[in-house]
Image (spheres, rainbow, N blue to C red):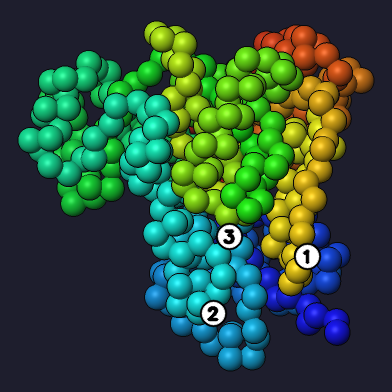
Amino acid sequence: MAQDPKTILCIACYFKGAEFMRECHRRGARVFLVTAKNLEHEDWPRDILEEVFFVDESDAAWNIANLIKGVSFLARRLQIDRIVPLDDFDLEKAAALREHLRVPGMGDTRTRYFRDKLSMRLQAHEVGILVPDFVHVLNYDRLNRYMANVPAPWVLKPRSQASSVGIKKIYTPEQLYQTLDTLGDEQSHYLLERFVPGDIYHVDAIVYQHKVVFSRVHQYMSTPWEVSHEGGIFRTHNVAHGSADEIELKRLNQELMTGLGLLQGVSHTEYIKSREDGQFYFLETSARVGGANIAEMLEASSGVNLWREWARLETLGEGESYTAPTGREDYSGIIISLARQASPDTSAYQDPEIVWRMNKHHHAGMIVASPRQERVIDLLDAYAERFRSDFFASIPAPDKPTS
């Protein structure tokens, strides 16, 4: 007997995930989208969407109670089979909806391991993964003991923001308490962490039945902190295939995914390799495709599109199993910069390794790919110098996310 088509409800407070929705449709699913009213005119794949519903909210923190009411009303006529958050800021929304509607997938507690920086650190530490020394900003006696025993500088991090948004470097207890005064009753939504100098890596993976079945390891050439707080240019690329760093990070990432309990889906996870002791420390993870066009970069070197693979996982039929892609082992890298120009012209960049160019207001960016890692790194270094004179612009680091 043929199975009824699955109904997938996507949640997106930012414009992304079109390829996920298209792949769900190609696999026979009915796809619905809930997004923000201010994204109404973005290039959503309307030709395959059954319906689009808009939430009239000014930021990513939608009113969850109203969202539950609206989706519950929709569920009077639809049997919703899966609820998929397309961005970090949508995970809590999807979890709350799953809990209320009793739809399969991660609920509130499990979602915290992939959204709340405090919860994920506590769980990672519990399963034996190295984490920079940290403390919840809650009890002042514990904070004082922490600062007496852990040398400065420290990093004050919001528990539920993404990337480096809202992060502040703290050098003295006095500076910390002055900052906490400005936060008022919001300070319990923060943690304080030892600043670990080092190189930051990210592992982008596919998980099926608790096992990492595909992953690629990359290294940021400028840390997210440097990009957002010091006016850097975003760059990242594959590490050497078969290298000690790749092997160790893949091993760590499997331990982490098992410890956090991700059953299936995709993940983007960041680690730092300490310059002091050479060890890898866990920084943060998420149960979604990495941002900043990392998925396009990964596809350029592997041929694997994480959005499409995620859609395959979400649309598996009863009794159907998932076969992970193998993927090529070439090399790719991406460079992105804010641009002074509204529509920057990158036509002067003509190297044959360029496989993708960014088309976004006040941004310049491209992806390069090659069988040789050295060529990718050389191009990213050369382009960083050229971008600074041709396009580069900077703005103060935001305290809250921007679309």
Q: Nearer the viewer, residue 356 or 23?
A: 23
In the shown orientation, is residue 235 left or right of residue 110?
A: right
Q: x%, y% of residue 208?
A: 66, 51
Quadrant the N terminus occupies: bottom right
Q: CA distance from mark 2 to mark 3?
A: 14 Å
In the shown orientation, is residue 12 left or right of residue 307?
A: left
Residue most extreme to the front? 319
Q: Nearer the viewer, residue 359 or 128?
A: 128
What residue is rendered at 71% in x and 54% in y?
A: 310
Disc 1 vs disc 3: which is toward the camera?
A: 1
Q: CA distance from mark 1 to mark 3?
A: 23 Å
Q: CA distance from mark 1 to mark 2?
A: 28 Å
What residue is rendered at 17% in x and 47% in y?
A: 184
Q: Which residue is mark 2?
A: 71
Q: Which residue is mark 3?
A: 85
Crowd tier of the residue under label 2, counting other residues whose Cα lies within 10 Å: few below 14, some 14–19, many 20 or above: some
